[in-house]
Amino acid sequence: MLLRWILSIRAFIRNKIFHIDDRSQWEIALANGMKVGKDLSIQDGVIVDVSHCWLIEIGDRVTLAPRVYLLAHDASTKRELGYTVLGRVKIGSDVFIGARTIVLPGVTIGDHVIIGAGSVVAHDIPSNSVAVGSPAKVISSYSQYIEKRKNQMNICPCYDSSYTANHITDEKRDQMIREIDEYKHGYVI
């Protein structure tokens, strides 16, 4: 009984006095109007603009790799103009956004898109494309990229799940290193 009372007092102090919200940024963003489709895969350290999350919309089957930033505001004008720039962020379905990519306000990313790691998406990316760089630029169609990788899989080594971090043996790790040194690339399930 005493513990429950102490916890409720602690929650009151955190929420009402210090305005600390114990929910994750994703719980806060969803509660405040961010729209998310089915089968969203969020990797470690993804940051969503919770201050304007209702301007963000994510489609179905989207993967956000580690440390992706989704920004719906740009405060660079705040000091001079007294206002912050806002823009919608719309991400279509069947999209992969690579590690450490920054998606800026006012950007629409179409369906069937791959954004390469480390990109800065400052402009719209059309459906069925692969874009990389800073600023991100389209380098190929989605189908061309998938076909290239499919052909590469016929040449390069392919590994099953026993070659992943929680399962790999020292022998398999050494084998993988040798083969990727030889072929430059490999593929794992």
Image: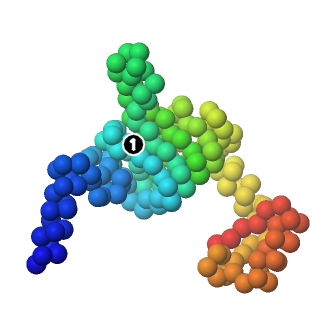
Amino acid at circle 1: Asp
For residue 175, above or below residue 103: below
Count of numbered badges drawn on the protein: 1
Placement of the C terminus among the 4 image quadrants: bottom right
**Residue 95 seen in this snapshot:** no
Q: Position of residue 27 (x, y in %)?
A: 31, 56
Colour basis: rainbow
Q: Residue at x 38, y 29 (%)?
A: 86
Give the quarter of the image for residue 121.
top right
For residue 152, above or below residue 51: below
- Left or right of 20 in this view: 140: right
Give the quarter of the image for residue 178.
bottom right
Nearer to me, 8 or 67: 8
Q: Residue at x 55, y 55 (%)?
A: 66
For residue 162, above or below residue 18: below
Q: Position of residue 101 (x, y in %)?
A: 57, 45
**Disc 1 on helix, strand or loop?**
loop
Q: Position of residue 38 (x, y in %)?
A: 38, 59
Q: Residue at x 16, y 69 (%)?
A: 6
Residue wearing tag 1: 49
**Residue 79 seen in this snapshot:** yes
Q: Position of residue 103 (x, y in %)?
A: 51, 39
- Left or right of 154 in this view: 116: left
Q: Residues within 10 Å of mark 1 (few under 14, many from 20)?
A: some
Placement of the N terminus among the 4 image quadrants: bottom left
Q: Residue at x 16, y 57 (%)?
A: 12
Nearer to me, 90 or 69: 69
Q: In the image as oriented, which residue stretches furthest toward the top? A: 80
